[in-house]
Image (spheres, rainbow, N blue to C red):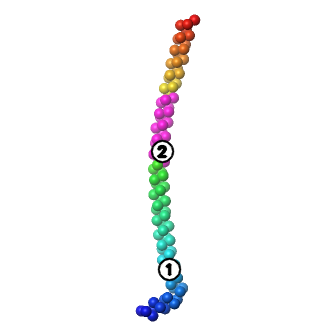
Amino acid sequence: MYEQAYAICRNMENVMGFFSDELRILDRNTAQYMMDEMQVEIDQKNAELNQKDIELGQKNIELERQKEELLQAQERIALLEKRLASQNP
């Protein structure tokens, strides 16, 4: 058994092949882990973006309501100015 181990160590090509295979597996696992981590980050960013879209929609609704209120107030002011002008000849 010692002779086999010694023979393997003497044959550097086999030893390097063994380490090369191990490194290839490690690289593949590392790449998969990194892709999984990136996917989690992408999913979180998408969730944040969806939340921002919802908030923006709510803000747009509020802005439209305020525009309508402003328009009504401007119409009322114009009507009151007209009445005032007709009362003061």
Based on the displayed image, in which of its 4 quarters is residue 4 positioned?
bottom left
Image location (x, y in percent) of residue 87: 53, 7
Residue extending furthest toward the top: 89
Q: Quadrant of the N terminus?
A: bottom left
Image location (x, y in percent) of residue 19: 50, 80
Amino acid type shown at disc 1: Phe
Q: Quadrant of the C terminus?
A: top right
Magenta part of the chain? 49-67
Check the image and report above or below for 84 versus 9. above
Q: Residues within 10 Å of mark 2 (few under 14, many from 20)?
A: few
Secondary structure state at the residue bearing disc 1: helix
Q: Is residue 50 magenta?
A: yes
Secondary structure that dominates the magenta span: helix
Secondary structure state at the residue bearing disc 2: helix
Quickly name the residue at label 2: 52
Check the image and report above or below for 30 versus 84. below
Image location (x, y in percent) of residue 52: 48, 44
Residue extending furthest toward the right: 89
Check the image and report above or below for 47 versus 26. above
For image coordinates 43% across by 92% down, the residue present is 2
For image coordinates 48% across by 55% down, the residue present is 42
Q: Is residue 59 magenta?
A: yes
Q: Residues within 10 Å of mark 1 (few under 14, many from 20)?
A: few
Q: Which label sits on residue 19?
A: 1
Amino acid type shown at disc 2: Lys
Labels 2 & 1 near each other (Cβ < 8 A): no
For image coordinates 49% across by 89% down, the residue present is 8
